Amino acid sequence: MNAPKSPAGRAPLMSLDEALADLLARVEAMTAEDTVATFDADGRVLAQDLVSALQVPPNDNSSMDGYALRAADVTEPGQVLRVSQRIAAGHTGGPLEPGTCARIFTGAPMPAGADAVVMQEDTIEVGGDIHAAHIQVIPEPGQWVRRAGEDVTRGAVVLAQGERLSPASLGLAASLGLAQVPVRVRPRVAMFSTGDELVMPGDVAPEAMKPGNIYNSNRFFLRTLLQRFGCEVTDLGIVPDQREATVAALQGAAEQHDLILTSGGVSVGEEDHVKPAVQQLGSLDLWQIGMKPGKPFAYGTVRRDGGGACHFIGLPGNPVSSFVTFLLLVRPFLLKLQGVPASRIQTLPLATTLPAHFTVARADKRREFLRVRRNAAGGLDLFPNQSSGVLTSMAWGDGLVDNPAGTTIANGDPVSYISFADLLA
Ligand code: AMP
Ligand code: MG
């Protein structure tokens, strides 16, 4: 970015909204399609409209266990109707004999001539020679009947292209008879962590840690988040803080991937090798975003030998910054890459206004995303340590308060709360 420098020599901060708009403008949806089993399609993005070849439900059917009858045949409570047939779900009956009723069960098709169901709780069964039922209520035509096509009409677009499939939409697709669905291909994402201080859990026991070592925690949540957002992940592990190693990792990954995602090494220190390595292989913009946590954020491209380029996103190394910038910036990027239309991407999920049960006495210059948790009193508690290195705040919290720059918070103030559940959806 060639932004003008402030008198102090630092580039002015970019707003999160500007960063989001800029980032999304650089990504085109991948268009290739795949066909997958409906069972395996959770979280995938539909590549075509799903049009129903049938109506759902296919026939009028009973929504209760009870008696199907003609409503007009019951003129007073307590009237007795002979039971002329029995229809269970999965079976069909014959036309209803006039002046009689049919024993019917939930989901069974209505017999021709019947227009209402009286639930069994409103009847008294009469056994013996003639099987009959006292109908204790006067039925309304249509009561307890599910109409053919009331859920889906034939020819309707039930799910539109660009929709991200959820457990409910898989059930809906199945109700149309679809064992497979057309989806967009998964983005292929290569990821690596940078930092000579990092060691892997399992490789080094806690008691064997050398001074200065820390466990690589970003790798665990970043890989999981990428998978949750539908990516096929190649995890390249830890790349040492060296220019050549970083260049080699980037160069190799660019060929077969749509995005390279890294954590750490994007500040401007001497040990931050990601920036010059990406610049050598393509282009890189290092953004100082006016948000806390998560100020440094890098977007770039890495050229491929065969032509074209691979997207590059460099997240900050501090775990909370890395996590939050993933949720606020990478999430919408991945949705757009997979073909979710821009109009349907909520860059920031809808916030709820809730009372703060805490105070923020010192206003920050940056827009702050505070880790909070809803409490039983209907308010929000703040995690006491909001440092960007304290990952406990993310695991303890159930969402973020979006606090505008320069704003203090007093106890009871209404604040904007965004749940992690929405950010992970
Ligand atoms: P960096 O952005 O590389 O300067 O890293 C900033 C801070 O985040 C440093 O304290 C790093 O040790 C820490 N950090 C970087 N990468 C990771 C990681 N993968 N897991 C845990 N902490 C990390
Ligand atoms: Mg580092």
Image: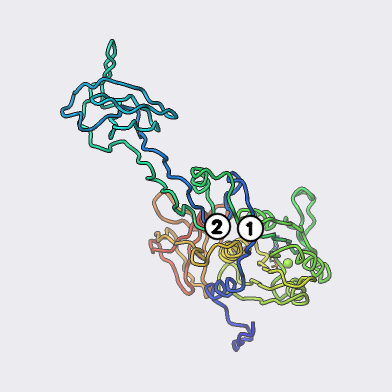
Tag 1 residue: 33
Lateral position of residue 23 relative to residue 118, left or right:
right
Query: Where residue 144 appears, x then y in whole percent?
Result: 31, 36
- Please identify the quarter of the rendering in which residue 47 is found: bottom right
* Secondary structure beneath label 2: loop
Lateral position of residue 29 relative to residue 139, left or right:
right
Query: Where residue 38 appears, x then y in whole percent?
Result: 58, 46
What amino acid type should be assigned to the residue bearing mark 1? Glu
Sequence-earlier tag: 1 or 2:
1
Q: Is 92 above or below relative to 320?
A: above
Name the one closer to the observer, 266 or 98: 98
10 Å crowding of disc 1: few (<14), some (14-19), many (20+): some
Query: Where residue 186 appears, x then y in whole percent?
Result: 65, 57
10 Å crowding of disc 2: few (<14), some (14-19), many (20+): some
Name the one closer to the observer, 16 or 265: 16
| Residue 263 seen from this side | no
Q: Is 194 above or below relative to 34?
A: below
- Please identify the quarter of the rendering in which residue 273 is found: bottom right
Tag 2 residue: 48
What amino acid type should be assigned to the residue bearing mark 2? Gln
Q: Are marks 1 and 2 in contact (CB under 8 Å)?
A: yes
Q: Does the beta carbon at disc 1 come under 8 Å from ligand 1? A: no
| Residue at image coords 40%, 26% | 88
* Secondary structure beneath label 1: strand
| Residue at image coords 79%, 50% | 204
Q: Is 195 above or below relative to 125?
A: below
Name the one closer to the observer, 276 or 200: 276
Lateral position of residue 195 relative to residue 422, left or right:
right
